[in-house]
Image (cartoon, rainbow, N blue to C red):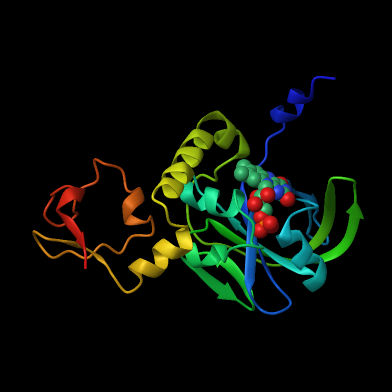
């Protein structure tokens, strides 16, 4: 069998969100999601059995999905896909909102809330069948696909994650250090308030007010 044939199946990429029974938010990146019925609206979600998010979903019976757009910062994927909620609070590292005790990425294209109706356990994974109990479109844009990730985005995600680690601080520590501080343009005073972390803006990014490059910004 040539299992790479399965890479020809197309998937999206989503941030799966859930709540620990104690109230802390957890989450991971998933691609194994698809709609399997119209009435009722049912999705299938497959989680690795060692995922902590999966453990929490089993306990609470609900999860959220944030549909990711192609413009997502690579660190968002690394944050949710390369580390476990057992060790860190992933949602502390991104902009998010909470709706009825489930977390969603601030910049999602669509937000979906599901309630588990059935589960099938395999050796490696658990498949949940879940009814959609809420959903909305939040922005125009192309969803990022798993094929995009494999074709070109994975390298950027790995690089961003590596750079983050080399800086010697975890994402949570960095956020704590920068808490309350803003990137300010030293030329015109513009205060950066974008959704992409300032550090992740491309090198050719310029101040939207006066046009100087990133090197003129200071954390204040
Ligand atoms: C591109 C990509 C796709 C992934 N797809 C899935 C998936 O469909 N199901 C799953 O359980 N984990 C998937 N993962 C792995 C989890 O996101 C990863 O193991 C995560 O660290 C689990 O975190 P947790 O322990 O906090 O749940 C994927 C990871 C990446 C980077």
Q: Position of residue 155 (x, y in %)?
A: 50, 33
Give above or below for 101 relative to 2: below
The residue at 36%/49% (across/down) is: 200
Quarter holding the C terminus is bottom left
Nearest the viewer among 18 and 67 is 18
- Residue 94 seen in the current view: no
Q: Quadrant of residue 198?
A: bottom left
- Residue 57 seen in the current view: yes
Nearest the viewer among 202 and 117 is 202
Give above or below for 212 relative to 54: above
The residue at 62%/62% (across/down) is: 87
Residue 15 in the figure: left or right of residue 41: left
The residue at 38%/59% (across/down) is: 195
Residue 94 in the figure: left or right of residue 205: right
Q: Position of residue 56 (x, y in %)?
A: 75, 67
The residue most toward the left is: 187
Q: Quadrant of residue 63?
A: bottom right
Q: Position of residue 2 (x, y in %)?
A: 80, 20
Nearest the viewer among 37 and 202 is 202
Residue 17 in the figure: left or right of residue 47: left
Give above or below for 16 relative to 142: below
The residue most toward the top is: 2
Give above or below for 218 relative to 214: below
Quarter holding the N terminus is top right
The residue at 66%/79% (across/down) is: 23
Q: Position of residue 38 (x, y in %)?
A: 80, 55
Q: Across the whole image, how many numbered discs are drawn on residues? A: 0
């Amino acid at each position: 069998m040539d299992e790479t044939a399965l890479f020809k199946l197309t998937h999206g990429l989503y941030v799966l969100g859930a709540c620990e029974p104690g109230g802390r938010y957890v989450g991971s990146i998933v691609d194994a999601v698809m709609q399997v019925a119209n009435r009722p609206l049912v999705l299938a979600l497959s989680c690795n059995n060692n995922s902590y998010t999966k453990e929490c979903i089993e306990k609470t019976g609900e999860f959220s999905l944030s549909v990711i757009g192609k413009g997502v910062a690579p660190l968002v994927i690394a944050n949710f896909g390369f580390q476990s909620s057992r060790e860190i609070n992933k949602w502390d590292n991104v902009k998010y909102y909470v709706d009825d005790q489930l977390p969603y990425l601030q910049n999602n294209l669509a937000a979906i809330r599901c309630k588990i109706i059935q589960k099938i356990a395999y050796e490696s994974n658990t498949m949940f069948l879940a009814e959609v109990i809420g959903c909305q479109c939040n922005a125009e844009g192309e969803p990022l696909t798993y094929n995009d990730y494999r074709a070109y985005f994975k390298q950027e995600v790995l690089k961003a994650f590596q750079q983050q680690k080399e800086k010697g601080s975890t994402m949570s520590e960095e956020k704590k250090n920068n808490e309350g501080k803003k990137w300010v343009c030293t030329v015109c005073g513009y205060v950066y308030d974008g959704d992409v972390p300032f550090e992740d803006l491309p090198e050719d990014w310029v101040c939207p007010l006066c046009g100087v490059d990133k090197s003129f910004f200071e954390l204040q």
